[in-house]
Amino acid sequence: MDKKLAVVFGGSRGIGAACVQALCADGFELAYTCTGAAPAPSRVAGRQVRAYTADIRDPQQVAQVFEAAARDFDARPICVVANAGINVPPAPLAQFDPARFRELVEVNIVGAFNILAEAARQVADGGSIIALTTSMVRVAIPNVGPYTATKAAVESLVRALSRELAARKVRVNAVAPGPVDTDLFRAGKDEAAVQRSAALSPFNRIGTPDEVASVVAFLASGKASWMHGQVVQPNGGQV
């Protein structure tokens, strides 16, 4: 296949935008999604990049992204990255707003299910599917249980899908970062809170989007041919 197409759900900022850059640098043509108005097509590292607006809670909109990308790039994706997701302000479980929890479930679980299910139908044989979760799934941190629960569900979907697609040689993995310096991470945090997160790593800092994107790009490459059904944790030694 001469043209390598990757589709990144949630590629307009933060880790997703870094994934767009890293995958283009590795020779992928790139389709990505955003929630606002899609910008005009562009080029990154000499590769064609197109954005599509999609609400991942709607399976039809997810399917339409794949259809539009196949039409615009005249190629079937060989890599799909499920990065789109949300967080909400932390709170103890006893005081957590049920509406906020439902919002997390609708985007982080239902949305991820829609992406992974359609990716399983659309990705080319021998391709790769990568989902973003969080290292906090494996750490007992108060006030973030509802968020980490939704990411734990995504990891369960990844593990099951890895077995289901093995016959087609499609590799399915998850990337579970520790704290990463993004707008989403910093929302509602003062500098003291940022430093508490930094202290979770023996390097005493938080990660960067590029450091996570490099792991995603590795998993999308042939160098990761023996990586399958794994949860890779770029977290600076947090766990």
Image (cartoon, grey):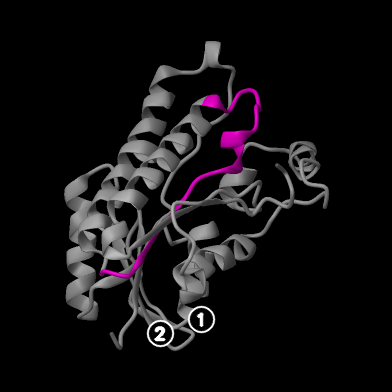
| Residue lying at 66% horizontally and 46% vertically, measured from the top left | 179
Q: Between residues 36 and 158, which one lies in front from this camera angle?
A: 158
Location of residue 238 (image quadrant): top right
Query: What percent of the width, then of the height, locates residue 169?
Result: 32, 65
Q: Residue at x 64, y 45 (%)?
A: 186
Q: Between marks 1 and 2, how big is the CA–CA gap? A: 8 Å
Q: Which residues are magenta?
A: 125-145
Which quadrant, please, contains the N terminus? Answer: bottom left
- Taking the magenta stretch, the answer to whether it contains residue 130 is yes
Which quadrant, please, contains the C terminus?
top right
Residue under label 1, please give it: 25
Amino acid type at circle 1 is Ala
Along the horizontal axis of the image, is 144 left or right of 132? right
Q: Is residue 142 above or below residue 172?
A: above
Is residue 201 inside the magenta stretch?
Answer: no
Local crowd size for mark 1, using a 10 Å CA cut-off: few (<14), some (14–19), many (≥20): some
Q: Look at the numbered disc 2 and give the secondary structure of its residue.
A: strand
Image height of 64 relative to 51, above or below: above
Of 76 and 47, which appears nearest the observer? 76
Are dots 1 and 2 in contact, CB under 8 Å? no
* Residue 81 vertical placement versus 188 (above, below): below
Q: Which residue is mark 2?
A: 47
Where residue 23 appears, x then y in whole percent? 47, 74
Residue 40, image x, y percentages: 33, 75
User: How many numbered circles are shown?
Assistant: 2
Image point 28% across, 42% down: which residue? 57
